[in-house]
Image (cartoon, helix red, strand yellow):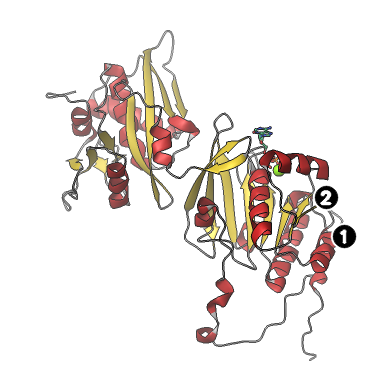
Amino acid sequence: MEPPTRDGLRKGALPLSTPQPLAQVNEDAFDRLSLPLPEFNRVLGGGIVPGSLVLLGGEPGIGKSTLLLQVASFVSEREGLVLYVSGEESAQQMGLRARRLGVKGKQLYVLTETSLEAIIAQVEQLKPRMLIVDSIQTVYCAGLTSGAGSVSQVREAGSRLMHVAKGEDLPIFIVGHVTKAGAIAGPKVLEHMVDTVLYLEGDRFHTYRLLRSVKNRFGPTPEVGVFEMGSEGMVEVPNPSETFLAERLPHASGSAIAVTMEGTRPLLIEVQALASTTSFGQPRRTSNGVDFNRLLLITAVLSRRVGIRLYDQDLFVNVVGGLRVEEPAVDLAVATAIVSSTQDKPVAADLALVGEVGLSGELRSVSHLEARLNEATKLGFKRCLVPRSIHHEPPTRDGLEVIGARSVQEAVQIALGHRGVV
Ligand SMILES: Nc1ncnc2c1ncn2[C@@H]1O[C@H](COP(=O)(O)OP(=O)(O)OP(=O)(O)O)[C@@H](O)[C@H]1O
Ligand SMILES: [Mg+2]
């Protein structure tokens, strides 16, 4: 049998490799490019890893191109040539955006091209320090008959770019469109193939954007970075909890503070609820930022286990700042905000709440309690309501009174300062 030969990157061959003892593999390969964007570095696990292929997904218009152009600019200023391939926008459009964002970088090159072969030829010629392909759905490979954006094209383009990344030790960022359901369009295999998958999320009507890593071969997941999108592009939000609570009315009824975990980062958020008497027919339930089925469960528990009359109340629940929270640990804050609104009694202003609500009306413990309590302390909260377990006493700490409650009923009584039953 003939020995395998390296037949060029263009055909998508892997660079020839020989077995080596794992213990002797040197670690220098992890010489990450650290950008002056700590939130971005953090999501990548400490910076851009040379030779890594990163997929960035997100809704249309959420700011993917903006963020990558800023990243490209930083890398070009520090490291050298960066090639930004755009299959969606003209060079003029890119130029316009670059001027708006104040991106100058003389080493930042734009290429409007959709042929993968042409893109790879440019990479071989220009030898950039970083490549951005915006987006993978616009790229086509000459050998395939199907159109750009089809499953086979996306898979082939992804795999060839992977080989370029590994072969040239070149970090490559590719933008992926998302489907209506929010997943990255194209074959799931694309997500398996790449080293890192990032999602840029946010509510279009708000300026906050969350950059979330859902897979990362070079760092912990999930990890989250918080940005604010303005006319100068993405600006980091160094203290998101403070920002999300900035407009809070401390003594308004129907507002409760929860400590949620976004990846490994604790975040204080405000949950608001408004109950108003149903005018006709069925009571309405509207949730914004909280899972709708979770809201139905909480209302059922409040009706059956706590005895709150909700059958003739329309309920609106909202998480401030356009955030979407999926964690059950915010259940208690949602429940408390609802009761607070129905009774028009404010939740104590210095109180944060954490806990999952069970169907029996019990409070269930949550993960990362220490980190959550630390964040609440940092933001100046004096008390935190947490689930009390028969196995563990709630942790104690200076400056924060940690109050344990077994049931939603007990927790709501404490939060609203009731003496008797709710
Ligand atoms: N002059 C401006 N000032 C402030 N914000 C702007 C301005 N122009 C555009 N934007 C914002 O930038 C967003 C588009 O950003 P960007 O093109 O980076 O998004 P994208 O995720 O790449 O979109 P697509 O999926 O279409 O490629 C717009 O939705 C708008 O909110
Ligand atoms: Mg774009």
Q: What element carries label 1?
A: loop
Q: Quadrant of residue 132?
A: bottom right
**Residue at 27% from the left image edge and 47% from the top image edge:** 365
Residue most extreme to the bottom: 1
**Residue at 63% from the left image edge and 67% from the top image edge:** 50
Left or right, 261 with reference to 47: left
Q: Position of residue 372 (x, y in %)?
A: 31, 47
Residue type beneath disc 1: Ala
**In contact (CB < 8 Å): disc 2 and disc 1:** no
Work out whether residue 140 can be spotted.
yes
Q: Closest to the observer: 103 or 62? A: 103
Work out whether residue 178 can be spotted.
no
Read off the residue under disc 1: 142
Residue 219 in the image: above or below residue 276? below
Q: Closest to the observer: 178 or 268? A: 268
Residue 35 in the image: above or below residue 244? below
Q: What element carries label 2?
A: loop
Q: Where is residue 307 in the image (x, y as percent from the top left)?
A: 23, 23
Q: Position of residue 272 (x, y in %)?
A: 38, 26
Q: Distance between the residues labelled 2 and 1?
A: 17 Å
The quarter of the picture showing ligand 2: top right
- Find out if the beta carbon at label 2 lies less than 8 Å from the nearest ligand 2 atom: no
Residue type beneath disc 2: Thr
Residue most extreme to the left: 419
Read off the residue under disc 2: 112
Q: Quadrant of residue 100?
A: top right
Label 1 crowd (10 A; few <14 / some 14-19 / many >=20) = few
